[in-house]
Image: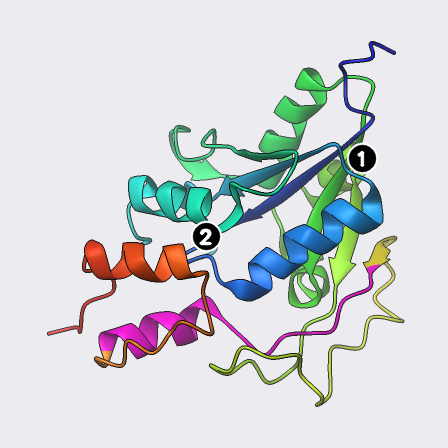
């Protein structure tokens, strides 16, 4: 294999609206535990499974640069935001397979995503393209950025092959961040990287709904 070609490549997709500290910790864990030479952070384009309208791709990509850009081997990948129509993971992995034809691909997921995996569009193709690497997530996801001690998802009987990422589940969600900002509570410094918090404030993202 070409010395310049990575042997292990990860894909971590999501709305990242906004990226928060649990996202950051998951990226760090995947890089370290899977030995990734490259990790593509892929903000969703037109999300087929989300009813709400996402914040513009420009802002989400900029926040991802601030949240992940300093991690070694990370690529902030805008391909899904440039794609017309609904955005599917199977298509993105197929493109990455062409880009890295002899590399092992990993798809980084949270436990909640694994439980709904068979509802994904062309999920069988996803399994053919990449190994799944899954981090646990607490059942109760609130607005507190700390490892959770409560019950987590039960994955032992899910029946889908996957590798386990050993990190404590964090009780944190992007929804909680948006809700705090929208209600005028800007105390999100323990929920998102400092640079992301500054960006949200600078661009007045997540305003209160009329």
Circle 1 or circle 2, nearest the eye = 2
Q: Quadrant of the N terminus?
A: top right
Task: Say if 119 sits above or below 155 in the image.
Answer: above
Q: Image check: 22 left or right of 56?
A: right
Q: Mark 1 points at which residue?
A: 128
Magenta stretch in the rendered image: 165-182
Q: In this view, does 157 lie above or below 183?
A: above
Say whether marks 1 and 2 touch (CB < 8 Å).
no
| Residue that protrudes farthest toward the left in the picture | 210
Q: Is 30 on the left-hand or right-hand side of 33?
A: left
In the image, which disc is placed on residue 15?
Answer: 2
Q: Position of residue 46 (x, y in %)?
A: 39, 43
- Sort mark 1 into few (<14), some (14-19) or many (20+) by Cα contacts within 10 Å: few
Query: Which quadrant of the view contains residue 92?
Result: top right
Position of 55 compared to 41: left or right? left
The local secondary structure at tag 2 comes to loop
The question of residue 171 being in magenta is answered with yes
Picture quarter with the C terminus: bottom left
Q: What element carries label 1?
A: helix
Describe the colour scheme in one phrase.
rainbow
How dense is the environment of label 2, judged by Cα within 10 Å: few (below 14), some, or many (20 and up)? some
Query: Does label 1 or label 2 sit earlier along the sequence?
Result: 2
Q: Residue 180: horizontal and vertical position, in percent?
A: 32, 78
Snapshot quadrant of residue 121: top right
Q: Is residue 179 left or right of residue 163?
A: left
190 over 39 or under it: above or below:
below
Q: Residue at x 29, y 54 (%)?
A: 199
């Amino acid at each position: 294999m070409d010395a310049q070609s990575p042997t292990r490549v990860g894909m971590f997709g999501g709305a990242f609206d906004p990226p928060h500290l649990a996202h950051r910790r998951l990226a760090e864990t995947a890089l370290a535990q899977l030995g990734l030479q490259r990790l593509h952070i892929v903000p969703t384009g037109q999300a087929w499974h989300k009813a709400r309208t996402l914040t513009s791709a420009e802002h989400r990509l900029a926040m991802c640069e601030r949240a992940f850009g300093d991690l070694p081997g990370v690529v902030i990948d805008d391909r899904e935001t440039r794609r017309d129509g609904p955005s599917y993971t199977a298509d993105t992995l197929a493109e990455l397979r062409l880009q890295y034809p002899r590399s092992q691909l990993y798809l980084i997921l949270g436990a909640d995503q694994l439980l709904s995996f068979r509802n994904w569009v062309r999920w069988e193709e996803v399994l053919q393209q990449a190994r799944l690497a899954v981090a646990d997530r607490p059942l109760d996801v609130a607005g507190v950025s700390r490892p959770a001690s409560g019950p987590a998802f039960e994955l032992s009987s899910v029946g889908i092959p996957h590798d386990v990422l050993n990190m404590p589940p964090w009780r944190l969600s992007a929804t909680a961040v948006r809700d705090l900002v929208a209600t005028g509570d800007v105390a999100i410094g323990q929920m998102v990287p400092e640079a992301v918090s500054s960006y949200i404030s600078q661009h007045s993202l997540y305003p209160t709904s009329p």
